[in-house]
Amino acid sequence: MMRDYAIRYGFIVLLVGLIAYFAVAADGFVSPQSAVFIFQSVAITGVLALGVTATLVVGGFDLSIGSVATSAMMAASYAMVVLEQNAIVAVIACLVIGVIVGLINGWLIVYMRVPDLLATLGMMFLLLGLQRIPTEGRSIATGMTMPDGSVANGKFSEAFLALGRHRIDFFIPNLIPVSVVVLVVLAVLIWFFLEYTRFGRMMYAVGSNERAAELAGAPVKAYKIWAYVISGVFASIGGILLAARLGRGDIASGNNLLLDAVAAALIGYAVLGAAKPNAFGTAVGAVFVGVLLQGLTMMNAPYYTQDFVKGAVLVVALVFTFALSGRGKR
């Protein structure tokens, strides 16, 4: 009985304990400003992690989400600053990039039989190079000089920047960033989609036993491709939010997006003893990563120790979930 309770609620207790520890050990951790920083970091990480969750559900994995997000950020910046287009055009361009990358990933994995890790890793490197070509490796900002000698005079629209910078009043003024609202809406949608629609339940069936699902008449290939399209679209939404927050196309800004998003998605396995990919657990995992990083930063922990701590927590969470529950046995 105690073991069951530990498996089911252990991670929630760990999260509460972590918050309590930082509240005591880090001056200013329990403050509106700290909450805003946590919310902002959680938003983009969480959106990307929800996309990863969709691929995990069908038994796959997407390593290209970080590069998709940075490519979308660069595309939005290029559209508005260099091409002087409006926010709607920039957003549509980003979403199209997400859909195209998702379709290519799905096609490589399903029809070309390339292992998912290799296919998405190849896509990651391809996008990392492709996003630098139009500006020859320069970040994009108003007034920059382009490779042909022209000057980019466009600028980010206020409506677009509001997606990443505007804050909504919640008990106190300017507490909840709009990007967090976007995360909550997407989390609820993907949670309902996976748990309560036939399409979502069939995706779980594909991930659980692809052969059995195929024999039952399920279009397994289509479900797997759609999972990667969802991942690509969510990653591009994360890139839109990142561009809106920074107000420029910074080629180095997405370096940690992949690691943080993957950590959040995998930590989700340990939430409430699910031992499977799930949207609610992923959202809690994103909050955990945000709290952890904010607390370590406020305690002046060296930056090079943060990935180590994240990795240690992830390993402990997964070992706790699968070893104690025995669900990892085949």
Image (cartoon, rainbow, N blue to C red):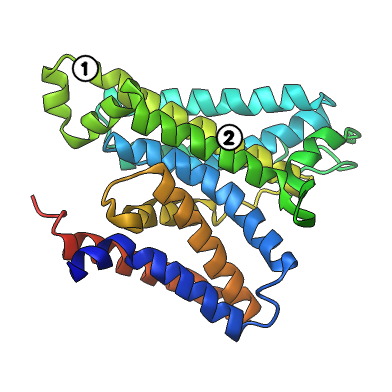
User: Which structural element holds mark 2?
Assistant: helix
User: Hey, which quadrant is residue 8 in on the image?
Assistant: bottom left
Which residue does the image show at 70% across and 78% down from the upper left?
A: 28
Q: In the image, is 114 to the left or to the right of 25?
A: left
What amino acid is found at the position of numbered circle 1 in the picture? Ala
Residue 279 horizontal/vertical position (percent): 42, 43
User: Taking 242 as reference, is 205 above or below it?
Assistant: above
User: Which structural element holds mark 1?
Assistant: loop
What amino acid is found at the position of numbered circle 2 in the picture? Ser
User: Hey, which quadrant is residue 57 in on the image?
Assistant: top left
User: Taking 265 as reference, is 99 above or below it?
Assistant: above
Q: In the image, is 143 to the left or to the right of 252?
A: right
The residues tagged by marks 1 and 2 sit, at their Cα atoms, a distance apart of: 28 Å
How many numbered marks are there?
Answer: 2
Q: Quick check: can you spot residue 208?
A: yes
Q: Nearer the viewer, mark 1 or mark 2?
A: 1
Residue 236: mark in rendering: 2
Q: Residues within 10 Å of mark 1 (few under 14, many from 20)?
A: some
User: Taking 245 as reference, is 288 above or below it?
Assistant: below
Which residue does the image show at 86% across and 36% down from the upper left?
A: 158
| Residue annotated with mark 1 | 218
Q: In the image, is 198 to the left or to the right of 27?
A: left
Q: In the image, is 93 to the left or to the right of 219?
A: right
- Precedes in sequence: disc 1 or disc 2: 1
Give 317 or 309, whichever is nearer the viewer.
Answer: 317
Residue 248: mark in rendering: none
Q: Quick check: can you spot residue 249?
A: no
Residue 100 horizontal/vertical position (percent): 50, 23
Which residue does the image show at 51% across and 24% down from the upper left?
A: 99
Which residue does the image show at 82% across and 44% down from the upper left?
A: 141
